[in-house]
Image (cartoon, coloured by chain):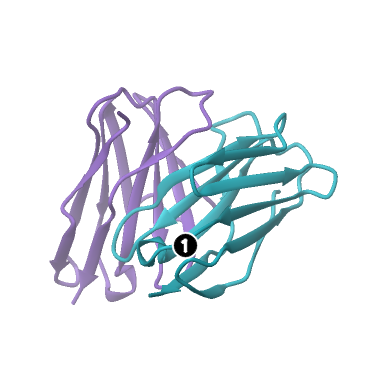
Chain colours: A purple, B cyan
Amino acid sequence: GAVVSQHPSRVICKSGTSVKIECRSLDFQATTMFWYRQFPKQSLMLMATSNEGSKATYEQGVEKDKFLINHASLTLSTLTVTSAHPEDSSFYICSASRDRGSYEQYFGPGTRLTVT
Amino acid sequence: GENVEQHPSTLSVQEGDSAVIKCTYSDSASNYFPWYKQELGKGPQLIIDIRSNVGEKKDQRIAVTLNKTAKHFSLHITETQPEDSAVYFCAASVPGGSYIPTFGRGTSLIVHP
């Protein structure tokens, strides 16, 4: 159990367009979902935390109007990169935890975004 | 806030050898320490974790030790195999809030056949 999927796995978009990434918990209900960004050969950088039905909490320095997060159900969270620019190119990874008080996070396979 | 240091950044071993990766943390309130394995182009996968009320935990070829006094924890992989080659991340979590882990910078483990 505890499988998290992401879609798409890879996306290329043109500068100025928006792209949506989906994160789904397949076999459990995820009270909390997290979005990370990872640059090549770097560690994971937390972008935001979202709880189902409430607004996401963004980390310092992350623009909430640029990275729109929606956690509409207990199995789905979406990250929309709006007006994407080449510097937004990165590996985006989501994770999910079962309960608010749960330590364990289950990661998705990641989405490679390339903005041309 | 919590700060996690991880060493070495790169570790190269021969197949069959043991590999040890070490991490230190700064916040004595941290009580959950997971280790993740990330293969190229994939998301991190939890391979083992330990809580602060335990000093050691083992799962087949993988073991983790925790020294709360010194605030450091280590990952031990015995009888390494080429498929163990990946980037390994340690993390530490403080209870409360969303239990968000602080990650180390990662160790690239290369196992030569």
User: Can residue A89 be spotted in the picture?
Assistant: yes
In the picture shown, does residue B2 fall above or below B98?
below
Residue visible at 44% across and 71% down in the picture: B111
Q: Work out whether residue A31 or residue A58 is closer to the camera in this orientation and state it.
A: A31
Quarter of image, res A111: bottom left
In the picture shown, does residue A12 fall above or below A28?
below
Q: Position of residue A90 (x, y in %)?
A: 32, 67
Q: Can you name the residue that lies furthest to the right here?
A: B69
Q: Kindly identify which chain the residue marked by label 1 belongs to.
A: B
| Residue B2 left/right relative to A45 | right
Residue visible at 47% across and 50% down in the picture: B36
Pointer 1: residues within 10 angstroms few (<14), some, or many (20+)? many
| Residue A105 left/right relative to A94 | right
Q: Position of residue B21 (x, y in %)?
A: 61, 61
Q: Position of residue A79 (x, y in %)?
A: 28, 47
Which quarter of the figure is the C terminus of chain A placed in? bottom left
Residue visible at 14% across and 68% down in the picture: A12
Q: Work out whether residue A68 or residue B54 is closer to the camera in this orientation and state it.
A: B54
Q: Which residue is mark 1?
A: B80
The amino acid pointed to by label 1 is Thr
Number of numbered discs visible in the structure rendering = 1
Residue visible at 51% across and 26% down in the picture: A102
